[in-house]
Image (cartoon, rainbow, N blue to C red):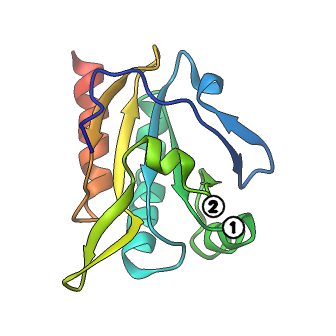
Amino acid sequence: MDNLEGKIAPHFALQGSDNRVHKLSDYAGKTLVLYFYPRDNTPGCSKEACAFRDLHSRVTDLDAVVLGVSRDSLASHDKFITKFGLPFVLLSDPETEVMRAYGAFGEKSLYGKKVLGTIRSTVVIGPDGRVLKHWPKVSKAETHPHEVVDFLQHLRNC
């Protein structure tokens, strides 16, 4: 997948864990962190979500909003949120349409085999709807949220 930096972010409309549909246009004028992850309640995804949870006040202090996206059902998201006390909305993309638009679903290597699946990745979308930063493949789930906060801090300082 091409890097999306500088491009207009692909539109999305997905059901959220707060029982409402979230659209990209809802976040016009805000900085949005959209992170894609493979599955609720798996070790790497739990570490990443908990790191975003622990950094959530810093993210909001930097005038940004975090949304997580996976193929999981809203019921699965509810359990995940409750288990780890997540303070942000998780979106459900069971058809992978939004993940595909953001390059977060496709061929990847799992234990040496090529499989189709969710590619852990993140985009930061600016107030004007353009992608400011794209991590097309996140390898260290537990430390990645710190990179995101560092980027948001850098944006503020510019």
- Quarter holding the N terminus is top left
Q: Which mark is residue 73?
A: 1
Q: Are marks 1 and 2 in contact (CB under 8 Å)?
A: yes
Towards the viewer: 63 or 79: 79
Q: Secondary structure at mark 1?
A: loop
Above or below, 28 against 79 in this view is above
Towards the viewer: 74 or 12: 12
Instruction: List x then y, in percent, for residue 88.
Output: 59, 50
| Amino acid type assigned to the residue bearing label 1 in the image | Ser
Q: Which mark is residue 94?
A: 2
Where residue 71 sits, quadrant-wise, is: bottom right
Towards the viewer: 39 or 85: 39
Is residue 119 at least partly visible in the picture?
Answer: no
Residue 5 relative to residue 90: left or right: left
Extreme-right residue of the structure: 19
Crowding at dot 2, Cα within 10 Å, few <14 / some 14-19 / many 20+, comes out as some
Above or below, 33 against 131 in this view is below
Give the mark nearer the N terminus: 1 vs 2. 1
| Residue for point 45% across, 68% down | 38
Where residue 76 sits, quadrant-wise, is: bottom right
Residue 152 relative to residue 57: left or right: left
| Residue for point 19% across, 84% down | 112
Instruction: List x then y, in percent, for residue 128.
Output: 45, 13
| Label 1 vs label 2, nearer the camera | 2
Is residue 64 at least partly visible in the picture?
Answer: yes
